[in-house]
C-alpha cells in the first residue's frame, strides 16, 4: 500500500522597512511610505514545487484493508458529525466519514488553493434531515491540492486539526449548519481507499479466449511496480545504488557545511553486526534523516557505498529519501519523514519491529535517553530534553537559553545576568518556577542556530557539559566577609564533536508527551507581588507605579461608514479601496517587545526609523565629548559653567560649559534654554530635571555645532526629541522669543536650529482571525486613538506604556486559548500597493477603531 505524507512548515513571511533604510528587524515587514495613505508591502512566499503554495499539510494514505482509524494516533477522539457545533472543542478530536462529493480545487486571487468536499458518516442512519450525517469540508493550500490528487469519491477519511465555522450554504444544500475548515500546520487527513470492484466474469471468459501473446502483454501492462528491496549492511556492494535499513549507533545533528549544503554524519548497524558510516549532504535541512537519539531506525532509499581513504561511506544518490523511526519497543511506528511521498507497508513494519527487537537485545538503545535536571552530576556530559522558556544573546558568539524540564537540580546553579530588554520571552518568573530553571550558555554555531528557536519549543540538547565552579556571596552573619558557594554551569561548546547540537522535538514525540505529563503534575504558581524588574521586560524606562487592579476593556468603531459587517474571507476577496467592518479576534502581533513598536516618522520625506537605544546614544555623546578643542560662542550667547554632582561617593563633581541666550538672560529665564557642551548622556539626563530645554552641542572647527542627529537634539524633562538627517539643515541659532511668549517648546527650538522634527508613532502588525480566515493588518495612523495614548507619552511615561501593555495582554493573553480572547469590532481599509518588483497587492490597515477603558487608567497629560 501507499503511505503519502506531505509536510512542511509554513513559509509565509512579510517584511517591513524602508526602501532607503535598513530593515527594522527580522520579524518586520519592509515598509516604505510612498504616500500618506498607504504602505508598500513586499510579501515573499516559499512555494512547494508540487502545489505552488505556501502551506504543505499531511495527507496520509493507509494500508489496504485497514480502516481510516487504524493508524490514527490513539490520543485523538472521534466525535459524531451530528454533535458538531461552533462551540465544539476541536483539539485532539477527529471526524470520520465517506467522501460523497468532491469539487475540483480553485485558486482565487489570494493565490491559495481551496477545495470543497462533503463527507458522510457511513456507520450512521442515512437520514440527513434528522441526523445531519453529512457536512461540508473546506481544505486550503497544498492540503487541498494533495487531497485532490490522493482522495477519490467513496474513500473513507478521518480529518483532524480542523476548525468549525458556520455554513453559509445551509439553507441551500440542507446539510450540516456548520462546516469544517482544514488549514495550518496541525491539519491532517487520513484516507482509506475504496477497494477495487471484483472482476467481471464475462471479462474473465473473454480474456481466456485471447492469444497467449496478447495475454502476456496484458499481464505485463497491469503488473504492479516491484517493491523496494533492502540490502543487509554486510552485503553492500561498492558503487551500485541500494536501499538500506539500519539502527543508529552514533550521530551528529545536521550542520552548515562550508558550501551551500547542510551536512549530517551518523553510523548505522543491523543484524549482520556490520557498522557503516553515512555522510549526507542536502541543501534543505528537512531532507536529512530526523534522528533524535541512538537506537533510532533509519530507512534510506537510493544510497550507494563509496570507498574513501581506506574507508567506506554511504552517500546519497539522485532521488535520495529517508525515514526515521523511534527505536523503542512498543512505541508507535510513526515515520519521521524527509520526503514528500513514500511507500510504507506491512513488510516495512515487520523490518522495523525486527530491528527494534534485535536492538533491544544488543543494548544499543540507551536505557535513559536523556538525563533530567534532578539527576545532573558535576563534570558530566549529558543529553537534556527540556522546554525553552526564554533566550537572550550575551555577545556575538554566545546565547543564554533559559530552560526547564519540570524537575529541580539539587545543586546551586549559575545565575546569568541578562539585559531584560534583550530577552525574548519572559524575563522573570515566580520564585517557585525560577528554582526549576537552568541557564544554558550555547556558543558559536549553536548560538547561530538558537536564533531560530522560539520560547515554548521543546528541545533536545546533546552533549551538554556540566562545569562546577564557585561564586562569592555576602555572608549573612557578617557584613564584612564573603563566602564561596559551589555552583554548576551548563555549557554547549561550539562544533559538532561527540554529537553536540540542538534539535527541536515535535509535539507528538513520546519524550515531549512524557515531559508534559511531568510538568502538568506541578502545582500552579501562586500569585506573587510584582516588582520593578517585571516591568522592565517591556519598556526601556524605569517603572513609576504599579496597577494591579483588573481593568475591563471593550472595542468600538468611531467611523460613520454605513456598511454591514463581513467575514475576513469576504474581505480578502474584495477589491482595494473599500472600507470593511469586521468582528475578529487577535491571534498574534508584532513586535512582541512592545517598546520596539515606537518609531520615529518624518512627515516631510515619509521615512521611518527605529528609536535609538541608550547604548547607541551614549556612544554619540562620548564621541562628541572627546572633541574638547576651543570653541567660540556665537555673539548672541553668554558662556558659563554648570556643576554636575558626582554619580558616586568620593568622585569629584564635574563642571561643564553652557551657553545661554542673552535675550533669555535679560528676561530672567536662565532655566528656559541652555546649550550644553561636553556632557555624557547620563549627565544630560540628570541636568534635564532642572532646565526646561537642553540642547547638547559640540565643538566643530572652533564653532559650536549640534551633535549627530542620530542623537536627540533636544531634552525636555524626560522627553527626547530627534531630527531627520535627510531633511534638516542644522545650525546653532538663537530661538526667536517674541514678546509675551511664555513657553519655548520643541517646535520653536527645532525651527530655530533648522531641524526637521521627527514625530513619535506606534507601528504594529496584528494578525486577525475569525471563523473563516486570518488576515494581517497594520496599526499605525490610528494607533494613538486605538490605544488612547500618545506615542510621545509612551516614549517617556511608564503609565502610558502600561496602558498599551495591559491592552495587548487583554486582547492576546500569553498562553491563552483562542476562546479566551475577546472579540473586537474593527474598521479596516483595504488599499492597493506595489512591491519592489512592481507587482500589485492588497494591504489592510486598522482605522477609526478605539479600545475603551475606565478613565482612571488614562495617562497624565503632562508626565514630564
Image: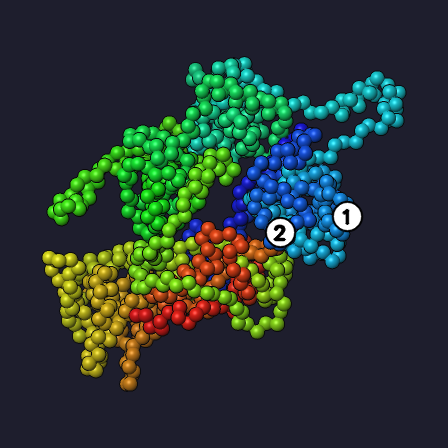
- From this viewpoint, is residue 505 visible? no
On the picture, is 807 further left or further right than 223? left
Q: In the rendered image of this protein, does residue 800 appear above or below residue 401?
A: below
| Residue at 38% from the left image edge and 31% from the top image edge | 371
Image quadrant occupied by the C terminus: bottom left
What x and y, as percent, mark residue 861?
36, 73
Task: Determine the secondary structure under disc 2.
Answer: strand
Q: Quadrant of residue 596?
A: bottom left
- Residue at coordinates 23% horizontally, 69% vertically from top-left? 689
Evaluate whether residue 212 shows in this view: yes
Q: Would you name the residue on which mark 2 appears?
A: 164
Question: Which quadrant of the view contains residue 10?
Answer: top right
Classify mark 1: residues with Cα within 10 Å, few (<14), some (14-19) or many (20+): few
Q: CA distance from mark 1 to mark 2?
A: 22 Å
Q: Please give the label number shown on residue 34.
A: none
Q: Relative to residue 33, is residue 118 depicted above or below?
A: above
Q: Earlier in the sequence, mark 1 or mark 2?
A: 1
Between 633 and 477, the one lying in front of the other is 477
Residue farthest along the bottom direction in this orientation? 739
Q: Kindly identify which residue carries mark 1.
A: 127
In the drawing, does residue 277 fall left or right of residue 171? Answer: left
x and y, in percent, of residue 105 in the image: 69, 47
Name the spot of residue 426 as percent of width and height, x first: 38, 50
Amino acid at each position: 500500500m501507499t503511505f503519502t505524507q506531505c509536510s512542511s512548515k509554513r513559509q509565509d513571511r512579510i517584511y517591513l522597512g524602508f526602501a532607503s533604510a535598513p530593515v527594522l528587524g527580522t520579524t518586520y515587514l519592509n515598509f516604505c511610505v510612498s504616500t500618506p495613505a498607504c504602505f508598500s508591502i513586499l510579501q515573499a512566499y516559499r512555494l512547494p514545487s508540487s502545489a505552488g503554495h505556501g502551506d504543505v499539510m499531511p495527507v496520509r494514505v493507509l494500508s489496504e484493508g485497514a480502516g481510516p482509524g487504524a493508524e490514527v494516533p490513539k490520543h485523538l477522539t472521534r466525535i459524531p458529525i451530528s454533535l458538531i457545533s461552533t462551540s465544539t472543542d476541536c483539539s485532539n478530536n477527529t471526524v470520520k466519514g465517506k467522501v460523497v462529493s468532491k469539487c475540483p480545487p480553485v485558486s482565487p486571487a489570494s493565490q491559495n488553493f481551496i477545495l470543497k468536499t462533503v463527507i458522510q458518516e457511513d456507520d450512521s442512519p442515512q437520514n440527513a434531515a434528522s441526523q445531519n450525517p453529512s457536512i461540508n469540508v473546506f481544505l486550503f493550500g497544498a492540503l487541498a491540492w494533495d487531497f485532490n490528487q490522493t482522495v477519490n469519491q467513496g474513500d473513507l477519511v478521518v480529518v483532524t486539526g480542523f476548525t468549525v465555522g458556520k455554513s453559509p450554504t445551509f439553507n441551500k444544500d440542507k446539510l450540516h449548519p456548520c462546516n469544517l475548515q482544514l488549514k495550518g500546520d496541525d491539519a491532517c487527513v487520513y484516507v482509506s481507499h475504496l477497494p477495487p470492484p471484483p472482476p467481471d466474469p464475462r471479462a474473465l471468459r473473454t480474456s481466456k479466449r485471447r492469444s497467449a501473446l496478447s495475454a502476456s502483454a496484458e499481464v505485463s501492462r497491469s503488473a504492479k511496480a516491484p517493491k523496494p528491496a533492502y540490502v543487509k549492511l554486510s552485503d553492500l556492494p561498492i558503487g551500485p545504488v541500494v536501499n538500506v535499513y539500519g539502527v543508529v549507533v552514533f550521530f551528529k545533528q545536521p550542520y552548515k557545511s562550508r558550501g551551500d549544503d547542510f551536512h549530517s554524519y551518523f553510523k548505522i548497524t543491523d543484524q549482520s553486526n556490520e557498522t557503516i558510516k553515512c555522510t549526507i549532504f542536502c541543501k534543505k535541512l528537512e531532507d536529512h534523516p530526523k534522528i533524535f537519539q541512538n537506537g533510532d531506525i533509519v530507512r534510506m532509499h537510493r544510497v550507494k557505498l563509496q570507498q574513501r581513504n581506506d574507508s567506506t561511506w554511504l552517500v546519497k544518490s539522485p532521488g535520495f529519501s529517508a525515514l526515521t523511526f523511534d527505536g523503542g519497543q512498543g512505541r508507535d511506528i510513526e515515520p519521521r519523514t524527509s520526503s514528500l511521498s513514500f511507500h510504507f507497508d506491512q513488510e516495512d513494519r515487520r523490518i522495523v519491529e525486527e530491528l527494534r527487537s534485535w536492538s533491544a537485545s544488543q543494548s544499543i538503545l540507551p536505557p535513559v535517553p536523556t538525563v533530567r535536571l534532578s539527576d545532573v552530576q558535576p563534570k558530566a556530559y549529558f543529553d537534556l530534553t527540556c522546554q525553552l522558556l526564554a533566550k537572550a544573546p550575551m555577545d556575538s558568539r554566545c546565547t543564554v537559553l533559559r530552560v526547564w524540564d519540570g524537575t529541580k537540580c539539587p545543586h546551586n546553579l549559575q545565575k546569568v545576568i541578562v539585559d531584560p530588554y534583550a530577552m525574548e520571552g519572559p524575563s522573570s518568573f515566580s520564585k517557585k518556577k525560577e528554582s526549576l530553571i537552568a541557564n544554558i550558555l550555547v556558543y558559536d554555531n549553536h548560538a547561530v542556530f538558537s536564533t531560530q528557536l522560539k520560547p515554548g519549543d521543546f528541545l533536545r540538547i546533546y552533549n551538554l557539559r556540566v562545569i562546577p565552579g564557585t561564586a562569592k556571596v555576602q555572608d549573612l552573619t557578617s557584613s564584612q566577609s564573603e563566602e564561596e558557594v559551589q555552583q554548576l554551569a551548563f555549557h554547549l561548546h561550539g562544533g559538532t564533536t561527540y554529537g553536540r547540537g540542538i534539535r527541536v522535538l515535535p509535539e507528538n514525540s513520546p519524550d515531549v508527551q512524557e515531559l508534559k505529563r511531568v510538568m502538568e503534575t506541578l502545582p500552579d504558581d501562586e500569585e506573587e507581588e510584582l516588582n520593578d524588574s517585571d516591568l522592565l521586560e517591556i519598556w526601556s524606562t524605569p517603572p513609576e507605579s504599579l496597577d494591579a487592579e483588573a481593568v475591563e476593556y471593550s472595542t468600538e468603531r468611531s467611523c460613520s461608514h454605513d456598511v454591514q459587517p463581513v467575514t475576513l474571507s469576504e474581505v480578502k476577496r474584495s477589491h482595494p479601496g473599500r472600507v470593511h467592518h469586521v468582528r475578529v479576534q487577535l491571534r498574534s502581533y508584532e513586535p512582541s517587545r512592545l517598546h520596539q513598536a515606537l518609531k520615529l516618522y518624518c512627515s516631510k520625506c515619509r521615512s521611518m526609523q527605529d528609536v535609538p537605544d541608550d547604548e547607541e546614544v551614549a556612544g554619540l555623546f562620548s564621541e562628541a565629548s572627546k572633541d574638547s578643542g576651543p570653541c567660540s560662542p556665537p555673539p548672541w550667547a553668554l558662556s558659563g559653567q554648570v556643576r554636575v554632582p558626582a554619580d558616586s561617593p568620593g568622585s569629584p563633581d564635574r563642571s561643564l560649559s553652557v551657553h545661554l541666550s542673552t535675550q533669555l538672560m535679560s528676561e530672567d529665564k536662565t532655566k528656559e534654554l541652555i546649550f550644553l557642551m561636553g556632557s555624557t548622556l547620563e549627565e544630560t539626563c540628570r541636568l534635564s530635571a532642572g532646565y526646561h530645554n537642553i540642547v547638547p552641542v559640540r565643538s566643530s572647527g572652533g564653532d559650536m555645532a549640534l551633535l549627530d542627529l542620530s542623537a536627540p537634539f533636544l531634552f525636555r524633562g524626560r522627553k527626547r526629541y530627534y531630527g531627520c538627517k535627510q531633511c534638516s539643515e542644522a545650525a546653532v541659532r538663537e530661538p526667536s522669543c517674541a514678546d509675551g511668549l511664555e513657553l519655548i517648546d520643541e517646535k520653536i527650538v527645532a525651527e530655530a536650529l533648522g531641524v526637521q522634527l521627527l514625530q513619535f508613532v506606534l507601528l504594529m502588525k496584528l494578525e486577525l482571525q475569525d471563523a473563516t480566515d486570518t488576515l494581517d493588518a497594520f496599526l499605525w495612523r490610528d494607533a494613538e486613538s486605538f490605544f488612547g495614548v500618545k506615542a510621545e507619552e509612551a516614549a517617556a511615561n511608564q503609565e502610558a506604556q502600561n496602558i498599551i501593555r495591559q491592552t495587548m495582554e487583554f486582547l492576546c493573553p500569553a498562553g491563552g486559548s483562542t476562546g479566551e480572547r475577546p472579540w473586537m469590532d474593527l474598521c479596516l481599509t483595504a488599499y492597493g500597493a506595489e512591491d519592489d518588483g512592481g507587482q500589485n497587492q492588497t494591504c489592510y490597515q486598522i482605522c477609526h477603531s478605539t479600545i475603551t477603558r475606565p478613565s482612571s487608567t488614562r495617562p497624565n497629560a503632562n508626565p514630564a
